[in-house]
Image (spheres, rainbow, N blue to C red):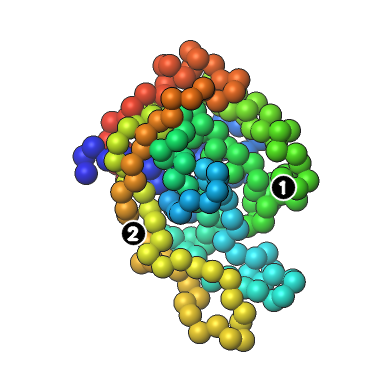
Amino acid sequence: MRDRPNLTLAVKRLVRDVAKRLPELAHVRASRILVVAGEARRTSRATIRPAHYRTSRRRAAGGAMKPLVRIKGRKILYVITLRPLWFVASTPEQRVATILHELYHASTRFDGTLHSGRRHGRLPLRKYNRRVQALLRKYLAVAPAEILAPFAHQGEARVRMWLEGPGSFQDAEYVGRRIYTEQQLFYGVAIMRSSKGRKASGSREKASGSKLQPPGRLRE
């Protein structure tokens, strides 16, 4: 356990620090984000999804609803799911860039919805990625080494996973769980291996070399 950093905690610390240092993401609240590891999804490294629908957790089309997710008593607005490629086929900088990429999808109201103008259907992926790379360069120039260090870890790491995950439902027919908490989560082990590919585009080698180093133990 001593050699397994807590990646859930590491990502939450990264999100909190990013919101403090980047005006473009100042609306983000780490306490309202749940970070979990999940299954592979094509070539995706991570995804962000609303944890509820805006009006009483109800979607206008079709009347679908979502259960309430509460962690430490706080209502969760977004869930970031880290995919296997994030762990075993990414450079340290790509891992940080992926988190920035997902955060940039969130509405500036930070109300559990996604930004309508930042969906890939509205904003071409190449243009979206250019914006994310600009944020990455800006952040790496000022990021504390201790915040970045866990993303260069090699080997086993701990990360939260769903024991029983929430989904959408139709209110009239649903008899399942309506509130999810820490009891429906557990800490599992994921293997981290850094890709030997190129660094994230536009990042500074000096910043990368001095800060993105293997970490010591992360404590909760």
**Rendered position, 7 above or below 204:** below
> Can residue 146 be seen in the rendering of this structure?
no
Q: Quadrant of residue 124?
A: top right
Looking at the picture, which amino acid does disc 2 mark? Phe
Looking at the picture, which amino acid does disc 1 mark? Arg
Q: Residues within 10 Å of mark 2 (few under 14, many from 20)?
A: some
N-term-proximal mark, 2 vs 1: 1
**Labelled disc at residue 182:** none
Q: Position of residue 179 (x, y in %)?
A: 48, 72
User: Is 51 on the left or on the right of 211, as rendered?
Assistant: right
Q: Name the residue at 78% across, 46% down.
A: 122
Which residue of the protein is positioned furthest toward the bottom in this rendering? 172
Q: Nearer the viewer, residue 180 or 74?
A: 180
Q: Quadrant of the N terminus?
A: top left
Residue matched to label 2: 186
User: Is 120 on the left or on the right of 192, as rendered?
Assistant: right
Q: Name the residue at 55% across, 25% down.
A: 200
Q: Position of residue 21 (x, y in %)?
A: 56, 30
Q: Name the residue at 32% across, 32% down.
A: 154
Residue matched to label 1: 119
Q: Quadrant of the C terminus?
A: top left
Q: Residues within 10 Å of mark 1 (few under 14, many from 20)?
A: some
Q: Name the residue at 60% across, 58% down.
A: 50
